[in-house]
Amino acid sequence: MIRIFVFVITLVLVADCFSSQNDDSIFDGKKALEHIKTQVSYGPRIPSHPTAKQHTLEFIEGEISPLATKITSQDFSAYGLKGTNLWATFVGKDAKPNRRLMIGAHWDTRPISDQEALKHNRDQPSSGANDGASGVAVMLELARVFAISPPPITVDLVFFDLEDMGNINQLPFAIGAKEFVKRNPFYRPSEGVILDMVCDKDLSLPKELHSKRQAPELTNRLWEIAREQNASAFLNIDGTFVMDDHVPFLEAGIPVVDLIHFPFPDYWHTTRDTVDKCSADSLQQVGNVISSLVYDNN
Ligand SMILES: [Zn+2]
């Protein structure tokens, strides 16, 4: 009887150990999905909706501030627009001065739906569940994990504003990232990853071609991790050249890889970029690959 009792107690302890591991120190795609819902609930994160932008910034800062070693908010003006980049640093346990990883995503959304079939829908903003909120959501969930298990190397999470104004009144894409590179000349991470459109239920991540050409070693490492993890969203094929937040970094000689869904989904830059398109499993795959990149990086 005592033996059975001890056996049962052992089982309970082992089960509890596993469940607390799952709950706390491992990336959770379901938690990331909740972060998408929260951002979308504020409305379009665009220059003409300052309240939605303010709420989103407060949300991101509120989540990150208790977790990061340091957080900086950088306001800027460019092309007659005002923007804010948020930069959070998690100092590594075994921090080495020459090893520093940046993970970035844009927190703004597209103010128009120029891919809508019907012309009268095209002046509506996109809700940006996938295009905008998904990358931010993965980063917020990573921040939670980093606070519990400090990464071996220093990791910066950078949230870029004004990525998705491209081709509107002849504006470029990646305004916020370009300003960030320009305004922080002493910040030069050894490598980085941009997360953009990473929640689709049928996530498709081929190798983006600027990344493959200008950051080949990191591109190969990411897809090798994905292969080891059977992360089926990562396709070992070429995608296309995408103008995204990694390009200003590549232009500064910093190897940054863009993880971006391609071919773009049919709801891309439409009013249908909504939370129902997203899946916790896809977010989980991306979170797992980035976690390995961070924790196995020595
Ligand atoms: Zn976009």
Image (cartoon, rainbow, N blue to C red):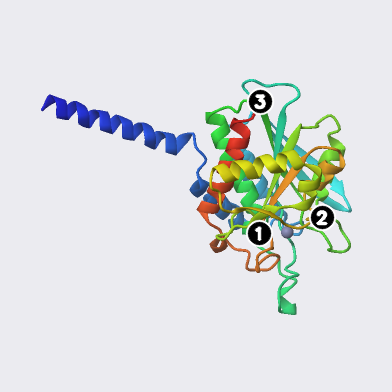
Q: Is residue 26 left or right of residue 257?
A: left
Give the mark nearer the N terminus: 2 vs 1: 1
Ligand 1: which quarter?
A: bottom right
- Secondary structure beneath dot 3 equals loop
- Amino acid residing under circle 3: Val
- The relative height of residue 294 versus residue 284 in the rendered view (above or below) is above
Query: In front: 271, or 50?
Result: 271
Q: Secondary structure at mark 1?
A: loop
- Quarter of the image that includes the C terminus: top right
Residue 73: horizontal and vertical position, in percent? 74, 37
Real-space Cα separation, disc 1 to disc 3, in angstroms: 31 Å
Give above or below for 21 relative to 76. above
At x 34%, y 33%, the residue is: 16
Which callout, 1 or 3, points at the residue further toward the start of the chain?
A: 3
Indicate which disc, 3 or 2, sits on the residue closer to the N terminus: 3
Decide if ligand 1 comes within 8 Å of the CB at mark 2: yes
Residue topped by disc 3: 91
Q: Amino acid at mark 1?
A: Gly
The verdict on label 1 being within 8 Å of ligand 1 is: yes
Residue 186 occupies which quadrant of the picture?
top right
**Could you tell me how far apart the alpha carbons at marks 3 and 2 are, in whole angstroms?**
30 Å
Give left or right: position of 165 versus 41: right
The percent coordinates of residue 255 (x first, y second) are 78, 39
Quickly name the residue at label 1.
128
Residue drawn at x 65%, y 42% is: 222
Name above or below for residue 57 compared with residue 131.
above
Give the camera-side residue of 160 and 223.
223
Please say whether residue 104 is visible from this viewpoint. no
Residue 52 locus on image (x, y percent):
67, 54
What residue does disc 2 label? Answer: 173
Disc 1 to disc 3: CB gap under 8 Å: no
